[in-house]
Amino acid sequence: MHIQDALQRALQGAIEHGREMCLLVDTAHAEGSYKVLDRWQIPYQSLFDETPEATLIEIAPLLISVKDLDQLQRDKIFKWVEDLAYVSPCFSWFETAWPPNVMVEHLRLFHVVGLSEGQAMLMRWYDTRILPVWFACLTEPQAEAFAAGVEAWLYVDRTGAIAELPITRHATDFPAKPDHGQPLICLTDTQYAPLVDAAELDALLTHLRRIIPDELKRVSHVQLTLFAGQYQQQAISAGLDDIDRQAQYVLLALYTSGEGQANPAFKLFIEQPPATLDAFSDGLQALPDEVWEAGQPVWDSLRKQATQTSQMAETRHA
């Protein structure tokens, strides 16, 4: 289902239920988005207001209530967020019985979270790479408090697919505000660890694009994310816990469409991988040529697959 179609369906459901439909855009991925909304005269509220980050409107998460917009405004905003969501993990939407100003006040309670040893940090949970991990790491009472007032919360993930938070229960009353200066939610080290891991794939993708920028321009963001994510997990399972060795592992997969990892020489090498980057890189380069020549580069194999799919479609319609 296209994002615009999903939004139209969600809006119709909210109207039928007598509720609000709210869009939430993390504009750190599209700086200055508030200027677009101002130009279209579409009202919004910043989750940064009434926080120390209030002046950072250029990168603020913005909440937009859809129900009272006219049809032209709805069409514009739905097309705009769809275009944003397909290139950046920045967009979610939900249905709520609460007025938008109340919902904004509620969501600001999660602007900062507590960590171990009395630490605190700003939590960008509205980034949709983080949102599902954030929700999954919460305890049941914390999740109920976070989802208070929300009937359904959907988002577009890093691959452009629509997903939904698994909200089974939620509070119907506004959570009690914590003491001044104290976060409403405090995470244990165990809860916080998956949030750190959620950023590892993005760090890897950035690293890979620095190493082979021209080649990776030939691979779509979605294809690269799915492919690199799969082989990064293999690398982690093999004991490669640093981004540099993971990148070397994934580079082999990229240059061979994953066939290099199936070679017996590589399998023997990865059973006891060298612990340092230099030794690991030297070990990879010392593998037989047949490892590096086991398959086509992924940018070529994907293009070949696309051509074959297109030819098959033309044949069916001939």
Image: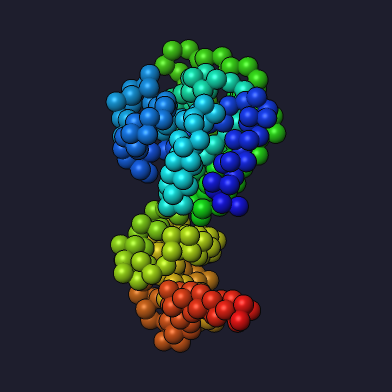
Q: Is residue 145 above or below residue 123?
A: above
**Position of residue 315 measured from the top left corner of the image (x, y, whole percent):** 60, 82
**Position of residue 66 measured from the top left corner of the image (x, y, whole percent):** 51, 31
Q: Is residue 169 above or below residue 3?
A: above
Q: Residue at x 54, y 28 (%)?
A: 67
Q: Quick check: can you spot residue 239?
A: no
Q: Residue at x 31, y 66 (%)?
A: 213
- Work out whether residue 241 or residue 19 is closer to the camera in this orientation and state it: 19
Residue furthest to the right: 168
- Work out whether residue 266 or residue 230 is closer to the camera in this orientation and state it: 230
**Position of residue 112 measured from the top left corner of the image (x, y, whole percent):** 44, 27
- Work out whether residue 314 or residue 196 is closer to the camera in this orientation and state it: 314
Q: Quick check: can you spot residue 180?
A: yes
Q: Is residue 293 left or right of residue 230?
A: left
**Position of residue 153 measured from the top left corner of the image (x, y, whole percent):** 60, 36
The C terminus lies in which quarter of the figure? bottom right
Q: Is residue 247 above or below residue 54?
A: below
